Amino acid sequence: MSVVEFVRAKIVLLGEPGVGKTSLRRKWMGESLTNFYQPTTGADFCVKRVRMSIDGADYLIQFLVWDIGGQEEFARIRHLYYSGAVGALIVYDVTRPETFYVLPKWIEEFLTYVGGFRPFVLIGNKIDLRAKRPEGCVTTEQGRQYAEILSRHFKFPIPLIETSAVTGENVDFAFRYLGVQVVKYIRSLKMLRKRSIVR
């Protein structure tokens, strides 16, 4: 009988208003989507447990998902919601390039308030709208190039995952991928602590 290790992982959803953070969260939780935009006030929160096999070991990951409002009026209180976060999905809307160009702001805010590097994934959302609005969209190649630059800078794989909360494409994969990276990050911290004790 295999041993299942329990991991509690607080993750945050970040990005400009209207990029689809709440829709991604609702889709992953199996909730219905609304046809109108309702901004998140401060932050919203949900919990989901997922069993995963990572490098031959079994894990039960309890995701504590914080959907943080991107409106400027919440900037002064957002730091309250970052405490204890070990990962992030940083989201932009592929049909609104301005939400892509401000990603550095969100990355810097995340890393500042969590106190150093934590795993994160770039999410290019609303790919179902690309065919309807082909002009001016952020291309997959643009997103990948930026992810490669970040990966080299942090010496940690930072992927681009393109999603659609409407069709569900890659939504589950995005959360699960982040879960894998978070578990690896937590394991690396445990190894460092063991080495420091041995020394």
Image (cartoon, rainbow, N blue to C red):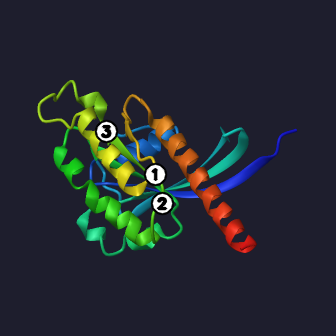
Q: Nearer the viewer, residue 133 or 162?
A: 162
Q: Which residue is mark 2?
A: 118
Q: Which residue is mark 3?
A: 144
- Image location of residue 66, percent across then percent down: 47, 58
Q: Which residue is mark 1?
A: 156
Say whether residue 137 is left or right of residue 145: left
Residue 1 visible at all: yes
Query: Residue lying farthest left?
Result: 135
- Amino acid bearing label 1: Phe
User: In the image, is residue 187 above or below residue 137?
Assistant: below
- Determine the CA span between mark 2 and mark 1: 10 Å
Q: Quadrant of the N terminus?
A: top right
- Image location of residue 72, percent across then percent down: 24, 66
- Amino acid bearing label 2: Arg
- The earlier-in-sequence mark between 3 and 1 is 3
- Determine the CA span between mark 3 and mark 1: 15 Å
Q: Quadrant of the C terminus?
A: bottom right
**Quick one: label 3, few (<14), some, or many (20+) residues within 10 Å?**
some
Q: Nearer the viewer, residue 181 or 188?
A: 188
- Image location of residue 36, percent across then percent down: 28, 43
Say whether residue 135 is left or right of residue 81: left
- The earlier-in-sequence mark between 2 and 1 is 2
Residue at 23%, 29% (x, y): give it: 130
Q: Nearer the viewer, mark 2 or mark 1?
A: 1
User: For the residue labelled by badge 3, is the local secondary structure a helix, a strand or a loop?
Assistant: helix
User: In the image, is residue 131 above or below residue 157?
Assistant: above
Q: Which mark is residue 99?
A: none
